[in-house]
Image (spheres, helix red, strand yellow):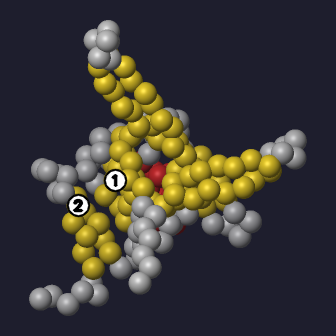
């Protein structure tokens, strides 16, 4: 059996207000960038160093797009689970470009708001239609309920 996993988990801050676009068939797509930072102390100088990485996030799931439209703003702290995808596109000058994005769609995507910018802390949203994701406000433990499971 050949098994592979494509899962990205990020915790970071939104760099600017999300962009909501519509496809030709009217479906909405949310785009935003999220920053993650690593910090360390330089062994030679003792100086604190920090490196920030920017990650492009694209959301196709209608329920999660709605959450982004209503609650996510520049500076929002988020927990994001999605898959890594690279796609080719052509810029205005005709040059082909590659971009790598964290994509949230289908049942394996989670978007959790970790701060109180417009939403109580710890609320979690999943793109699965049969699962409702909730989070305990005391310890941010995410609980996923699935009605299809046998209760034993």
Which residue occupies 62% across, 56% down? 86
Q: Which mark is residue 93?
A: none
Farthest residue in the top direction? 45
Q: Is residue 52 visible?
A: yes
Give the class, few, some or many, for how many residues have Cα within 10 Å of label 2's Cα (few <14, many ≥20). some
**For residue 77, above or below residue 8:** above
Q: Residue shown at 74%/47% (left/top)?
A: 97
Give 105 or 123, whichever is nearer the viewer. 105
- Label 1 sits on residue: 112
**Residue 21, x across and y down, in percent:** 65, 54
Which is nearer the eye, 1 or 137?
1
| Residue indicated by mark 2 | 142
Q: Quadrant of the rendered structure where residue 38 is?
A: top left
Quick one: label 1, few (<14), some, or many (20+) residues within 10 Å? many
Instruction: Measure how far apart labels 1 and 2 are at the Cα level.
Output: 9 Å
Quarter occupied by the N terminus = bottom left
């Amino acid at each position: 059996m050949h098994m592979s996993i494509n899962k990205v988990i990020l915790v970071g801050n939104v760099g600017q207000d999300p962009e909501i676009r519509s496809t030709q068939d009217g479906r909405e797509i949310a785009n935003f960038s999220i920053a993650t930072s690593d910090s360390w102390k330089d062994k030679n100088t003792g100086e604190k160093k920090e490196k920030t990485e920017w990650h492009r996030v694209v959301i196709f799931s209608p329920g999660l797009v709605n959450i982004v439209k209503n609650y996510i703003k520049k500076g929002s702290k988020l927990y994001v689970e999605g898959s890594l995808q690279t796609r080719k596109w052509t810029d205005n000058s005709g040059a082909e470009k590659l971009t790598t994005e964290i994509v949230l769609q289908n049942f394996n995507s989670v978007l959790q708001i970790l701060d109180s910018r417009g939403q109580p802390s710890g609320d979690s949203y999943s793109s699965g239609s049969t699962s409702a994701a909730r989070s305990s406000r005391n310890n941010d433990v995410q609980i996923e309920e699935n009605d299809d499971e046998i209760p034993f």
